[in-house]
Amino acid sequence: MRVIILKNKEEIGKWSAYYIARKILQFKPTAERPYVIGLPTGSTPLETYKELINLYNEGILSFENVVSFNMDEYVGLSPTHKQSYRYFMEENFFKHIDIKTENTNVLDGLAEDLKKEAEEYEAKIKAAGGIRLFLGGVGEDGHIAFNEPGSSLSSRTRDKELTYDTILANSRFFDNDVEKVPKYALTVGVGTLMDSDEVLIMANGYNKSRAVYHGVEGGVNHLWTISALQLHRRAILITDEQSVSDIKLKTYRYFKEIEMVNLDLAKVKEDLLAIK
C-alpha cells in the first residue's frame, strides 16, 4: 500500500484529481471501452471534484466515455431530495462536466426490493467490466462507504442499518436533528471495493488519525474496515499531516521518503499535461 502524505485537504484534492485524470487519459476510453470509476460523497472528495472540474474546464480532461458507480445511498430518499447522494453528485460534480447521465450509476434509495437493487448493482458493475479505480473517504471509526465496524471484509452491495454514531455524525446535514436522518442505507460492500483494480482512499484532519493508524499499522480487522486496504494489490491512502499523527515516526519518515518525488503537485500536473 502506498501512503501519500500531503499538507492539507486542498493538496489531497489536487493530488487525487491529477492521479485520476492521468489514469483516464492513459486508458484512452471510448464509448465501447469506457473508463469505470467508483465515487464517494461527503466533504472529503469535494476538493477532488473541484479540481477535476477545473481540469475539464481547462480542456485537459473529458468524462464523455467515463462510467461511474457511487458507493452508497440513503434508503427512503428520492434522487431530488437535497440530502440524497444522487442530488449531491449532480450538484457537486456531474452537472459541471460532460459525463452522460446514463453513465452515472447511484443506488436507488426508493427501490421496493432492496436486495434485488443491490444484486442488480453488482451485476451492472460486472457487466461494465469491473471498476478500474474506486475513490473514497474514511470515517473516524474507519468505515468506508457504509461498511461500519463489524462489517464483513468480503461483503457485497447490500442494505445496512446505520449505527447511532453514523446517524449522529450525519445529522449535521439534516438540521442537526437525528430523527430526520435515514436509519438505513444501500452500500457497496468491502468485497466490492476490493474487487476494483485500484483503491484510492483520502483522509484529512486529526479526527481521522486513529483510522489512519489502523489502516497503516494495525492488523487486518473487521472492526476497522480501512484495514482491508492492506490486502489490496493496488491501494493508495492519501493523507494530510494531521491525519498521520498517530502512526510511528519511523513509519511516517519511511513513506515521506519513498514518495518524495511524487509530492510536488506542480510536477505531478506537469506530468499529466505531458500525457495530454
Image (tube, rainbow, N blue to C red):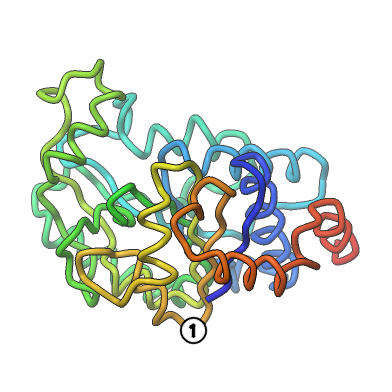
Determine whether, in the image, residue 266 is placed left or right of residue 258: right
Residue at x 58% of width, y 68% of height: 34
The residue nearer to you, when weighing 37 against 175, is 175
The x and y percentages for residue 230 are 41, 77
Residue kind at label 1, given as amino acid type? Arg
Q: Quadrant of residue 225?
A: bottom left
The residue nearer to you, when weighing 109 against 143, is 143
The x and y percentages for residue 141 are 27, 52
Residue at x 25% of width, y 52% of height: 146
The residue nearer to you, when weighing 119 against 171, is 171
Callout 1 secondary element: loop
Q: Residue furthest front?
A: 249
Residue beneath disc 1 = 233
Residue at x 50% of width, y 45% of height: 204
Count every numbered label the image shows and give the total: 1
Give the quadrant of the C terminus. bottom right
Residue at x 17% of width, y 19% of height: 177
The residue nearer to you, when weighing 55 against 225, is 225
Q: Quadrant of residue 77?
A: top left
The x and y percentages for residue 53 are 67, 40
Q: Quadrant of residue 52?
A: top right
| Mark 1 nearby-residue class (10 Å; few <14, some 14–19, many ≥20) | some
Determine whether, in the image, residue 100 is placed left or right of residue 138: right
The x and y percentages for residue 116 are 14, 62
